[in-house]
Amino acid sequence: MADSKSSVDERLIARFNQELGADLKNSSKCGDLVKYYRSELEDLRDKITVTDAGCIPSVKGMIDTGRSKLAELDEKEKRLDGCAEKLTDRIETYHQLMGEVGEKMAQIRVLQTVRDYMALIKDIENISQELEACINGKDDSKPIALYVALTGPNSILDRISGIEAPHLKMYARNTAFHWHDVLTAKYSTEFEALLKTIKWPNMNQSLEQFNPSKENISKLVLLAEYLFLVKLPGDQDLLSVKLTPSIICPHYTTPVELFVKPFRLRFQFHFTGNKQTNRLDRPEWYLTQVLMWAKENHIFVGQHFQSPALRAGIVNSSVRLEFVRGLVQLAIEKLIVDIEQIIQDEALFAHLIDEVLPFEQDLKTSLGYPNSYPSVVSVLVQPVFFVKWMAIEKKFTTDKMDAMLNTADPFELLDPANLDELKIPKCADQFIRLLDAIKERYCCLPQPSQQLQFLELQLELIDNFRCRLLQLYNDGVNPTKILNALNYLTSVLREWGENVHYLHLHAALYGPDADEISSVFDQKIEELNYCHQKLVEELVTWIVHEITARSRPYRYDQWPSMNRHDAKETLMVSATAREMFQATINHLHDMEQELSTNVFMVVVRMIATELDQWMISSMVANTKFSTGGAEQFHFDMTRNLFGMFSQYAKKTNLLFKRINDSCTLLTMPLGSAILLRETLLSPTGDEESWTRALQEVGLAIFDRKATLDVLDRRNDMPQIG
């Protein structure tokens, strides 16, 4: 609106400016303009006045039409007001009716609920009465069908599970519990009577010897199916037995309970109270007995009674394993009672551990006992006992490691017949066996966190063993023995790192989605490799020192004045080199005999590298060679020194690249040598041309400077300048 007004103002201002002009003297025209516009406005007013004869016809028509429409609207408004009053009256009437109907409908719904409630009660009473009538009849399937109608899938209990009727639910459940007890007692009595008939429990007999008749087996199978169907209503997990805060044994089905019952009685007779067989220092007696009972009977139970369980709708449970679990629970309950006393005596506790672990392993390997089931070892891994267990393991393994290193000759080779390959010291083999025994002891533990604590013990032992080996080395033990031990330990740990057991532990430590799958032993292998490398370097340094210490006569031989060799005579190794070469041969032979093959090959290459560098820096660089001297040096190196290493490398010239290049430069024809030097000293030369020249004469490692230095060692090279 403001924009519209502004636009009008602008047009008016423009109109006045046009009429008056820019001359202020024209301001007298303002009065004339006012008179003119006033006259125009009066004419317009007359034209739009309806009563005036001069009013514009179209305007007059529109005004008349608008007035008639307004009159019509006023009339309709009056009519609508009347309709609104009528509607309000009707709505009030309908609200009264709805209130009355709603009360009746609520009463009807209450009556329907009462009717349904009474119908459910009647259904429960009918089932109960029918069960009462047929419980002692000849048809055993009818009571089972009635009980399933009361408690099974789509039963009465299912129908009332979603409604708010606590008293009805309680009544239905109490009725179900009553008939569960009655039916269970009825069929359990018959089941137990048949078990006695077939002479159950089977003791100390093979499955072939324990061979009940087919008729009795058929009756047992049918009764088992009935008992599987007659189960307590509700969540079966609520029936679990909590032996300790951390050991919860799931409820097992009635047939399995009846199978286990005679074993429980025998177990309690032999292994409780003042019986001679109930001894804290002999846990193996009851563990062996439980294992024997399980092995002798689990196949029979699974073979005949898995099918009735499936027919009864039990699809996610193995009756065979449930029976074994029932027997194992006897041992668990027994150990829970005994362990408080056993833990007071370290020897008794250690013996208990030694018996429980093979028992667990046998259960898993022989019977397929799952890790998720309660086990005897679950008692030992409770925090208060597990801490004690770890302390015993650490003490025992540390003492064992000390004992294996304190024998008369802990580094005696394990297998003299295998000296050509891996030379395994006895102490290293025993240590690996110790680590493997620890793994076998803890691999059956139920939780990865518990296994990781044993892994930590293994890693700690590896570190201690490494430190003990270094201590023995510092005490004067032959380094080759230490190297063999480190080498064997490292190779085994690398192999173990790819084992499924240790890969699972790696996943437990770093998660299954770790960026890189590596070994749990990586850090220890790295530390062992570092020690191994340092010992090899020290060994090589010592050997090279022993060789070079005998080189003085050779280094100071008459190389500058040595005559050329007579072609008619056979070249012989320099007499001054024999002691040095003999020391080399002796050390290589000793190392080959004492070191594992892979370690020895590393030592050989390192000795060759050290000698290669030493021969150039300590001899060639400090000696002048006559033509005869160069020829003799070439023969000594390529035919003798290289020959000593030829059985360990196919191309010995690659082991001694510097010596080989020196021999090439010292013995090449004089003209070629002068040409090569000129090329390398040419002011117009560049790196590419120098490299090409060195390659053409067959040099492998020397650069321009080293080549010029060796060429200067030749007496026959002309002086420069």
Image (cartoon, rainbow, N blue to C red):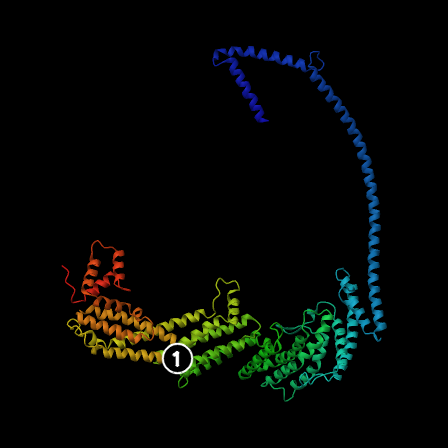
SS under mark 1: loop
Is residue 616 among what the camera can see? yes
Looking at this view, is 405 or 204 the one in front?
Answer: 204
Horizontal side, residue 189 vs residue 561: left or right: right
> Quick check: 178 above or below 198?
above
Q: Residue at x 46, y 78 (%)?
A: 432
Picture coordinates of residue 76, whole percent (x, y): 78, 28
Q: Position of residue 30 (x, y in %)?
A: 54, 12
Location of the C terminus (image quadrant): bottom left
Tell me the amino acid under the disc marked 1. Asp
Residue 382, given in percent of the width and then of the height, sits at: 58, 74
The reply, left or right, for residue 4 in relation to residue 640 is: right
Res. 593 image quadrant: bottom left
The percent coordinates of residue 565 (x first, y second) are 18, 74
Residue 405 visible to an observer of this rendering? no
Q: Which residue is drawn at 18% across and 67% down?
A: 714
- Where is mark 1, residue-wise? 420
Q: Which of 23 and 635 is in front in this view?
A: 635
